[in-house]
Image (tube, rainbow, N blue to C red):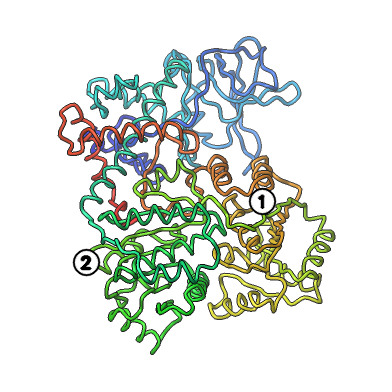
């Protein structure tokens, strides 16, 4: 297989330098192997040849056999098109091309037999197929096969006649080359037999040229199994190596700092979920191995308190702790919250952000080195080279998907021995996605809200019912509550009909003349933004008009209503994050999703899910199924960049869990990669890892 990866695609028959350049730029296909693993996105049954007399307006795709009687050019300029009058003896239809006219007339001749395939459109008595696939009847690639593969192409490729049909023919040329070569198997005989898997060579041919649906299913299963199996084995192997290589500090003491806080300063009783998570972390911290744990918890579930108590364990064992947040607003909020929790205790907490300069900054940096600062909270400023610790034992990273892996890696360099790492997120991650993106981390979940919290009531409202919405907001404000109104854009876009913040702010000022109103967006200077946030927090303003800058971390318990304008423009996870800004006090809170009438089915489904449930994990699972893993916020910086070519985490979650179990058993039985029967597996994993960066150790 490695040989195929080294063979330049331009030397395959039908490619050449120009097409090779196009394939590389558009599809990242450089070698024979790249093309071989460029899988079809769908298949169409071409086992039947229809007659023109049978065509009606309800047929999705048809295949015809006949001749072009004549070609003619119609229209001028941009409306110019080529029409071929095609007949099979039972009637006549029009084949229409709007691009590549010279290519078509040069390639296809009148009165020769062709197989024509495409989607018929019926206007009155006239049938048209636009840009059909055409093959000479005596040399059609798929004339003897039941299913025709379809490959994704770009507009630029289509302009150069590098269509799905062209890729199919290149694939046929590739398999003619491979007839005389051996495709090396990548799974052991034991795995193939035990799990009833097709040999790799058979699966690769069948995925491109399946004879029937059953053969296609078997080929897809084999290739998905292999892809997910090696993803999991890769993660598990690195996890094993990290645990052997990085011995963690032993925090075996629960001392005065922790006990004083627990007995005298705990703001409210811990939930059962919080207690369980703290026990899981204590087990890690006492084990002698480095903790590398992901803490998931819905908005308002008490992750910050759990993180603080974990940091106090570090202090009791003579170490410092650090918390890194993605924005100055969130870092400042954590700082204020933790200082309030620890008020009266002899624990020094400092805040370090980009706006802290001069003598104060110098003092913090000096006292970090002497150990006089016990807990440092900050933004990415804490990973600058000038920031050094006396004895950093624990790092907490909040909303970690907002940090790139290279940024997180710098925290490891703050100590000769890497500190324990706790990463937190309020963005619930579906189990299947977490197993792939964060499979090297142990996972703790806070799945219980503190007592007294009422679920947020969510409503979907069309924007023509604004008077009733505003009446509801006035009633809430009169009761002493506060309101968020969130817009997707700061200024109006000419291309998109979306309520924008600047116009929205003016409109809200007119609609609520008796109210004081804040405005916050990401382009404001940090000091201005912070001042507006603080005014809202102090209840000096009743309405905050904002962009999604308030999505993470803003905590105003008195705010009871979240209005999201153009809610159709947001993903489920983002809507859920925004909704989490309310419902943080004891009063009933509300989230109003405002949209226009024109909504797609996917959007309607998204909004229905938001109205039906407050469960962040249920919402994340639905988001994964609706949008796929690539669109979920933060996955581009997740740390493990596997390019899945055939498996779909949203659809293949059951298979993912199944192969993870197989990978775990193989690793348990052969931890040192010594068994001859697994040689092919370890060899292929090594080849894979040459192409992967080991980000697992810094997740």
Q: Between 50 and 399, which is closer to the camera in this rendering?
A: 399
Residue at 55% x, 27% y: name it: 132
Q: Measuring from the top left, give residue 622's x and y in whole percent.
A: 57, 42
Q: Residues within 10 Å of mark 1 (few under 14, many from 20)?
A: many
Identify residue for label 1. Answer: 568
Which quadrant holds the C terminus? Answer: bottom left
How many numbered marks have been drawn onto this rendered protein structure? Answer: 2
Looking at the picture, how far across and down is residue 452, in whole percent?
64, 58
Q: Residue 209, relative to residue 440: is it above or below?
A: above
Q: Secondary structure at mark 1?
A: helix
Determine the residue positioned at 25% across, 46% down: 240
**Distance CA(mark 2)–CA(mark 1):** 49 Å
Q: Is residue 233 above or below residue 570?
A: above
When the figure is inspected, residue 652 is found, relative to residue 354, above or below; the finding is above
x%, y% of residue 406? 33, 61
Where residue 550 sits: x, y (%)? Answer: 59, 66
Q: Is residue 362 left or right of residue 113?
A: left
Q: Secondary structure at mark 2?
A: loop
In the image shown, does 67 or 500 lie closer to the viewer? 500
Q: What residue lies at 31% left-to-right and 64% top-to-bottom?
A: 253
Q: 2 or 584, which lies in front?
A: 584
The residue where tag 2 is placed is 416
Mark before the other along the chain sequence, 2 or 1: 2
How many other residues sit within 10 Å of disc 2, few (<14), some (14-19) or many (≥20)?
few
Work out whether 63 lies above or below 313. Answer: above
Contact, CB < 8 Å: mark 2 with mark 1? no
52 relative position to 115: left or right: right
């Amino acid at each position: 297989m490695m040989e195929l990866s080294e063979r330049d695609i331009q030397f395959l028959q039908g490619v050449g330098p120009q097409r090779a350049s196009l394939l590389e730029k558009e599809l990242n296909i450089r070698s024979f192997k790249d093309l071989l693993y460029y899988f079809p996105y769908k298949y169409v049954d071409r086992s039947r040849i229809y007659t023109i007399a049978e065509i009606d307006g309800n047929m999705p795709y048809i295949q015809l056999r006949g001749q072009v009687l004549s070609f003619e050019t119609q229209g001028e300029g941009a409306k110019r098109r080529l029409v071929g009058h095609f007949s099979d003896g039972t009637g006549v239809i029009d084949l229409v091309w709007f691009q590549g006219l010279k290519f078509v007339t040069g390639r296809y001749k009148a009165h020769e037999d062709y197989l024509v395939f495409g989607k018929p459109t019926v206007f009155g008595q006239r049938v048209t197929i636009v840009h059909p696939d055409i093959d000479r009847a005596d040399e059609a690639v798929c004339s003897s096969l039941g299913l025709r593969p379809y490959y994704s192409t770009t507009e630029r490729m289509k302009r150069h006649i590098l269509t799905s049909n062209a890729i199919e023919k290149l694939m046929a040329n590739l398999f003619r080359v491979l007839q005389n070569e051996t495709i090396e198997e990548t799974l052991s005989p034991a795995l193939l037999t035990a799990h009833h898997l097709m040999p790799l060579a058979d699966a690769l041919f069948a995925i491109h040229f399946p004879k029937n649906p059953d053969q296609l299913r078997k080929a897809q299963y084999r290739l998905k199994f292999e892809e997910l199996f090696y993803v999991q084995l890769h993660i598990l192997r690195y996890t094993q190596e990290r645990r052997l290589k990085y011995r963690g500090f032993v925090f075996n003491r629960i001392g005065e700092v922790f006990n004083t806080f627990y007995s005298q300063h705990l703001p409210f009783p811990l939930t059962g979920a919080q207690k369980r998570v703290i026990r899981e972390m204590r087990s890690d911290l006492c084990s002698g191995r480095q903790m590398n744990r992901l803490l998931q918890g819905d908005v308002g579930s008490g992750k910050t308190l759990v993180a603080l108590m974990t940091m106090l364990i570090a202090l009791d064992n003579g170490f410092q702790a650090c918390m890194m947040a993605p924005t100055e607003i969130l870092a400042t909020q954590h700082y204020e919250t933790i200082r309030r929790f620890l008020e009266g205790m002899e624990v020094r907490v400092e805040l370090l952000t980009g706006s802290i300069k001069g003598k104060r900054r110098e003092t913090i940096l000096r006292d970090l080195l002497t150990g006089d600062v016990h807990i440092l909270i900050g933004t990415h400023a804490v990973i600058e080279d000038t920031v050094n610790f006396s004895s950093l034992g624990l790092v907490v990273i909040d909303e970690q998907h907002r940090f790139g892996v290279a940024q997180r890696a710098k925290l490891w360099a703050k100590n000769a021995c890497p500190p324990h790492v706790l990463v937190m997120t309020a963005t619930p991650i579906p189990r299947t996605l977490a197993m792939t993106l964060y499979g090297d981390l142990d996972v703790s979940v806070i799945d219980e809200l503190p007592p007294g919290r009422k679920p947020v009531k969510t409503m979907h409202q069309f924007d023509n019912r604004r008077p009733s919405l505003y009446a509801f907001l006035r009633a809430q404000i009169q009761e002493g509550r506060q309101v968020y109104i969130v817009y997707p854009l700061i200024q109006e876009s000419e291309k998109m009909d979306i309520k924008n913040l600047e116009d929205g702010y003016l409109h809200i000022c007119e609609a609520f003349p008796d109210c004081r109103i804040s405005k916050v967006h990401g382009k404001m200077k940090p000091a201005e933004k912070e001042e507006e946030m603080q005014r809202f927090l102090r209840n000096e303003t009743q309405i905050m008009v904002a962009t999604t800058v308030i999505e993470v971390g803003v905590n105003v318990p008195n705010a009871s209503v979240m209005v999201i304008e153009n809610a159709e423009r947001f993903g489920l996870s983002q809507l859920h994050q925004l909704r989490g800004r309310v419902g943080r006090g004891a009063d009933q809170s509300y989230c109003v999703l405002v949209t226009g009438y024109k909504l797609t089915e996917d959007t309607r489904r998204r909004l229905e899910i938001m109205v039906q449930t407050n469960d962040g994990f249920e919402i994340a699972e639905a988001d994964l199924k609706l949008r796929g893993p690539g669109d979920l916020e933060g996955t581009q910086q997740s740390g493990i960049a596997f390019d899945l070519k055939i498996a779909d985490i949203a659809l293949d979650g059951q298979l993912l869990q199944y192969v993870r179990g197989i990978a775990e058993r193989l690793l348990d039985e052969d931890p040192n990669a010594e068994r001859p029967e697994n040689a092919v597996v370890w060899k292929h994993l090594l080849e894979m890892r040459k192409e992967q960066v080991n980000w697992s150790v810094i997740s």
